Amino acid sequence: MIRYYEIRHLVGFEETNFVGNVYYSHYLRWQGHCREQFLLDRAPDVLADIMENDLKLFTLKAECEFFAEIKAFDELSVRMQLLELTQTQIELGFDYVRLDKGDERRVAKGRQRIACMRGPNYATVPARVPIELREALTPYQGVGSPMSIAAGGSRAR
């Protein structure tokens, strides 16, 4: 069974373009919402460290590939999995699935590479992924995706 963290979203008119389908930039915004909700639900101490201290999660790369259109009032599931975890970086995968009366159709997929950093804005330096975040992400490791382990840098299968 594939494990993923999921948020549900009902597409609104404001997310569509003049043709009636969802404007592409919203998919990246939904990645951010999913990531933020994950921190709130599964790693609240990490979220507190971001809000109150000097931990920063910098998005290095974000992408999305589209397979089918969605429109206003479509119900969407955004499903996040851990693809890679190194000492200082995380790569997440996202599946966008349209839900329709028990039927599911994958409409897009995306990825996001994130670097953990610490320090003031003018002098940030790479930092280890916090242990609480590692532990929160591990159950959502994608099937068939290598995951680097901080100790020794070996790959888990």
Image: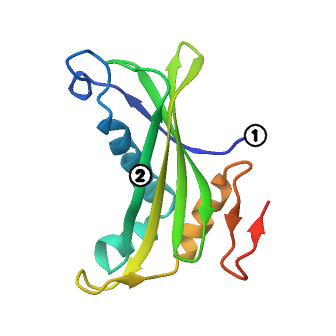
Amino acid under disc 2:
Ala
- Seen at 54% across and 12% down, the residue is 101
For residue 126, side relative to residue 105 (left or right): left
Identify the image quadrant of the C terminus. bottom right
Q: Is residue 45 above or below residue 140?
A: below
For residue 128, side relative to residue 12 (left or right): right
For residue 60, side relative to residue 53 (left or right): right
Q: In this view, does 134 lie above or below 25?
A: below
Amino acid under disc 1:
Met
- Seen at 23% across and 21% down, the residue is 13
- Which residue is tagged 2? 62
Q: x and y percent of residue 147 in the render?
A: 68, 63
- Which residue is tagged 1? 1
Q: In this view, does 108 lie above or below 84?
A: above
* Category of crowding for the residue at label 2, using alpha-carbon neighbours closer than 10 angstroms: few (below 14), some (14–19), many (at least 20): some
From the viewer's side, name the closer residue of 8 and 23. Answer: 23
From the viewer's side, name the closer residue of 29 and 36. Answer: 29
Q: In this view, does 26 lie above or below 51?
A: above
Q: x and y percent of residue 73 in the render?
A: 34, 18
For residue 4, side relative to residue 16 (left or right): right
Check residue 88 in the rendering and tell me which mark sits there, or answer none.
none
What is the distance, in whole Å, between disc 2 and disc 1 at their CAs?
Answer: 26 Å
- Seen at 51% across and 21% down, the residue is 99
Q: Earlier in the sequence, mark 2 or mark 1?
A: 1
Q: Are marks 2 and 1 in contact (CB under 8 Å)?
A: no
Disc 1 is placed on an element classified as loop
Look at discs 2 and 1 and give the one toward the viewer.
Answer: 2
Q: x and y percent of residue 28 in the render?
A: 36, 44
Residue furthest to the top in view is 101
- Seen at 30% across and 38% down, the residue is 25
Disc 2 is placed on an element classified as strand
